[in-house]
Every structure is written in C-alpha cells, then in structure tokens.
Image (cartoon, coloured by chain):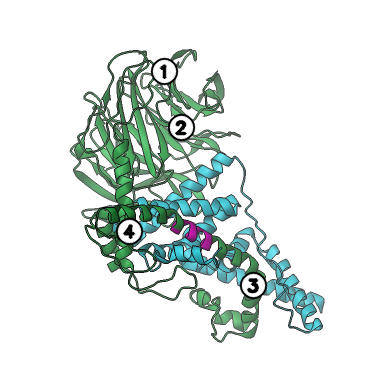
Amino acid sequence: MEKREDRLNPEEIDTLTERSGRQLPEEERRLIQDFYRLSENYRLENERSLDRIWIRLAQTQKPSLSLLENRQNEAGGKLLSMKGKSMETKDVSGEFAAALRTSQGAKQPGKGSRRNWRRRPGLDVAIAAALAIVLGWALLYAGSHAGTQIPATGGGSTKVGTGPQGTTGVIAQNGPRAPFCSFQDPNASIQANIEHTLSWSRRGEITTTSWNVDTYNVQTCRQVPALTNQQPTFAYWSPDGTHLLILWSQAQILDKTGQVLVTHTVTPGSVARVSTGYVPLVSLSGSGNANEASAWSPDGTRIASVYVTGTTYGVEIWSATTGAHQITLDCPANEYYGIRSIAWSPDGKYLTASAPQGSGICVWNASTGSRIVTIPGTTASESVAFSADSKELAFVRDSNIVIYNLASRHVMRTFAVADPYGSLSEVAWSPDGEYLAVGGQDLHVLKASTGSSIATYKSLARGTLIENLAWSADSTDVASQSADQQDAISTAFVNLWHVGD
Amino acid sequence: MLHDEKSLQDTLWLENSFLAELYQCHAPGLFAYAYRLLASREEAEDIVLDVFLGVLQNAQFAAFDREKQKSWLWTITRNKVVDCYRRSARRPLISIEWLAEPLYEDAALAPDQVSLKQEEYAQLFYAVKTLPEAQQELLRLRFGHDLKCSQIAPLLKKNESAVRSMLYRSLRSLRAILKKQEKGEK
C-alpha cells in the first residue's frame, strides 16, 4: 500500500481518477471504479439536469428566432433557416455578432463531448447571426422602455429619461413627495440579480452601477458622458469628490474627467500597483474578489474592500495611492451572505462591517486592525452606518433601526419603522448627524435623535426594495437606488429627494 | 425528455455554437455549485438556465477574455444563488446523499460475488462518511458531478493544485480507512 501511495503525486491525481483504460494499480482502479458505480445514479441525474437546462435554453430561444424568421420572410429576405440548414446572413451586424466571431476565432481546440450539445460543424456563423438578432430585439425592447411612465405619488415628475449618453433625467415640476431628479439605468445586456452601488460625490455627481457605470450631475440632472460607460464595474467617489474608484477585475482610480490615474490589480492579500495597461485579475477564481463592497477613508488615503478567499470573508485596507496592502480585518461571515456593507467612522478611527447570519456587526480600530466590538445579530443586518460624531452606529434589525453606542457597548435607541415590505434593508446617516435615511420598499427619513418621521417617499420602482442610499454632503438631499429585473433587462432606478419636501 | 425527437431537434441549432462550448465548459460546475448551496435540483436548473440566458443577452460577453467570461458566469451564478437563498429563507442541506448501491450492474455476478461486492460497497460507503465534510464534498463533486479539478477549483474557491492535493489526501485517507477496516475484520 505504501509503495502505491509513493507512486502517486498530486499532479497525477486527475489522470488517476479518469475512467480511462490507463493501467492503474489494481486497488486504486477498483476504488475509483467503485466510486463511479456508487455515484452513478446521482451522476446520471445530474447529467439529465444539464440536458434539461440545455433543452429549455434552446426552446426559450427558438420562438424568438422563428418570429424573426417569419418577419424576414414577409420582408422578402430569408434570413434564418433552422435545424442545421445553412443560412444566408443578410444584414447581420451588431456588436455581439462581431464579438462572437472574434471569440469563436479564439476558441480552443475542441475535444470530445459526451452530451448532445457537442460540436457540429458549419453552424458557427449562423448562430452568431441568430444571437445577434435576438440581442437586437432585446435592445429594441430596452429602447422601447426609455421614457416609460412610472407612478409618482403626489404629482410632479412624469417621465424618466434613459438611453444615450448626455440624457437628461427627470426634473420635478412641483408638488410634494416628488424626487427632484430621477433617472433609470437599464442594462439590456444582462439578465441577472447583480449587486448595484450608489455613490454621491461632494462635488455634485451621483454615480450608480448596474453592471455599467452611470453618472449624473445632480444640479442639472444630466448624464455625465465622461463618467458613464458599459464596463462592468462598481463605483465609489472619494470623500472630496475628486476621484472615482471603480472596481472589477482591477481597481482603477479616475479623475473627474474619466481619465484613469492609476490601475491596481486586486488580489486577496495584496493590491499591486501597475503602471499602465490592462492587467487581468489572475486570482479572480469563481466568485470574484473585487466586486464586493468598498469604502474610502474620510481622508481619502485608504480604501477598505471586502474580499473573499475560499469561504472566508474579510476586509482589507489598502493604500489608495500605492495600492499597498495595509491591514487585513477579520469578521467571520456566513458563506452565502458574506459581508454586505462596510463604513468608516467620520473621524477615520474606526471601520465597521456587517456580516448578516455570521458575526453580525464588526467594528475595528482602523489603525491597528484589532476588532473592538462585535454585535451579534441573529437576524440579517445588511447595512450599518456611523453617526457624524463617530460615537454611534445605526443598523437594521428586522423592521427596526437600532442605535448602538460604541463607548458603552449598549443599544441606546430602537426605532420601529413601518414599511410595506415588512422589513428594512438599508440605513444611511446624514453627514450632519441629524437624520437617518432608511430604506425598505419606501424611503423613510427619521430624526436621528428621536426617531420621529420627517418624511416618507413612496417607492417609484416596480415593487422592489431599496438597495442603496446616499446623502448629499450638506445633508439636504438624499438619493435612493432600487432595482428591477423584467424581461431580461436589469434596471437601476435612482431618485433624488429634497429632505422635507 | 432528452430522447424526445422534437426536443432533440430543438437543440440542434445551438450545437457547435460558442454557447455550446461555453455551456459544456462551465455549466456542470455552475450547476454543482447551485445545487450544493440550494439543495434543490429544480432551483439549481432554473439558475443555470437564467445565467446562460444572461449570456445571450450580454452584448459584451463574447468580447470578454476567457477569464472574464468565467468570472462573469460565476459572479452571476453566485448572486442568483444568494438571492434565491435569501428569498427562500431556508438553509441549504450541504450533505446530499449521492452514494447509492447500484442494483442492476451486479446482476450478472454470482450470488456470492454479489454479496462480496455489496460488502465492499458498504465498507466504502462507511469509510466515506468518516472523512471530513470538505473531503466528502470534494469526492461528491469529482465523482458525483464528474468534474475535473480545474472545474472544482472555482467552486470551492481554491486553486487547482490545492484541489488536486485535497483529492489526493482524500483518496489516501480512504485507502487507510479501508485498510484499517480490513485488518479489523481479520
């Protein structure tokens, strides 16, 4: 037995466990064969699942293509022919088709397949054409949604602008409880429940991400083309409003004109600065490490980012100027919930993060990295915020807002907030410390000292929870972002409100 | 359903496509991931379907390099699983029974051979259950989902060599346990 173990090494293990006719030591071969036999029913069931998904995928696409085929026939041009026949590809254009061809050209050599989605020669161009047209219809659909009516309580705005860069959002006409600016950020290119971000710069831009970046000038309610793109990123303004951090497979810091000032690679344990060019994130294995929450320190010199490695979540603080890793902070999190939000105290001394279903709320000394407080939470708290004096925390617990004093380690106040959804999702403390913005299905603004309601702004999105909140620097305005996904279009809805209107 | 001629026809037009290659490369791992966390075959199938529908809708996807495509697929899948997990407000059953004694395959064996084989299966079944949960999980993914180490790596958020080492250790532990069982019987 020992001799056989000696013959094995980790590099050979994949080969060892293949069901090939390779000559293996008898006991190894029997063990692996037994494994395959014992797991056969389960494995076959999994293969049937994959077959079912594939067939459903084909069926989902086929009606659209048939419809298109009919329309093209009516128009006198046969565009598509299904079921393996060759296709004429008249008037086939579009970004996806071109990209697809490029990608197909870069395909790795095919290898044997055991399922019915295996390769069949001669259809590549046809598929590219078909997919391009499906995409075209999706984009047309998205276009048709631009300018759709959305319900607004209390009158005021009626139309929301979307679409090409430079679009103007809605500027409220008049009336109470209407946002003074609204815009939608649809993304027809994805169908996914993605994470969104919302960040309000001190200098008057507001940026939301919905698998792209969309920036609006708050005063004019007009889109800022230089800070709007289709790259899948998450965006955070620096405290002084001069720099925009965008994160995806790399971290980039942009100036206000959209010029990339610096690019960092982001890996767990290190953020390495690179001088120029695109550097892929080699460690982005699986879930992705760079797309978790991030926050600038109040002085703009440090950035805290949530990372995940293995099933372990944590927070890293890194230098915004050099990209150098500084401190790793520990806050055990639930594998599925992770760490949902992080926030610096306004004095820069502390950092807090929420790990719902895990540790709860963690608070660290941002200089030493030591965890000074852990507030266990049996229920999810996705959001946590610091008070203006850095002495208190506000977080969500079910349908309550809890105010916790860091010095005394006690809950000071609890405010119940009645929301149509039944529970709350977000909380944001105004920079002057006076108000709490609370998100559920509606946006609630409370007096932070007493919990008394200042205003409730009814949801303008299509029945979804508010995902992000942001205050203006002068604490007079607040923005809410919610998202909706319908018909393969994920749309972020952003509404800006004057508090007290 | 797979053997239904019409259903099969429906799939033909997609064969050999970019999507087919992508599906073949990533769907087994994504499905295993979703199934592992949600413990619902139906929900896992729905999620993987949604993810690939998302690919069809994504204008930029094909222009991504392979690493970015992979990370996109995993990120979307993960977000959908988390979303589903939140909505259902239930905890996943990580341990799914995946080892079951095959009945038909041993039918040709003589009764005494069948009995011997059944005993070996029982020993292996018992030995697997004594392994740490992580190693059991790895064996399930390797044999139950027929995934290669490179496909398991993103699923367990480990690098490929770590998965290989872990698989190696798991098999080594198994052999040790089986050997011990054998000695105990003697």
Residue that appears at 36% across and 32% down: A493
| Residue mark closest to the camera, 2 vs 3 | 2
Residue A175 image position (x, y, % from top left): 33, 13
**What type is the residue that disc 4 sits on?**
Ala
Residue for badge 1: A435
Say whether marks 3 and 1 touch (CB < 8 Å).
no
The residue singled out by tag 4 in the image is: A130
Q: Residues within 10 Å of mark 4 (few under 14, many from 20)?
A: many
Q: Amino acid at mark 2?
A: Thr
Mark earlier in primary sequence (4, 3): 3
Q: Which residue is mark 2?
A: A464
Spatial separation of the CA atoms under disc 2 and disc 4: 33 Å
Quadrant in which the C terminus of chain A is drawn:
top left
Q: Is residue A309 visible?
A: no
At label 3, the amino acid type is Phe
Position of residue B134 relative to residue A289, above or below, is: below
Q: CA distance from mark 4 to mark 3?
A: 42 Å
Mark 3 vs mark 1, foreground winner is: 3
Q: Residue at horizontal 41%, vertical 36%?
A: A484
- Give the label on residue A35, or none: 3
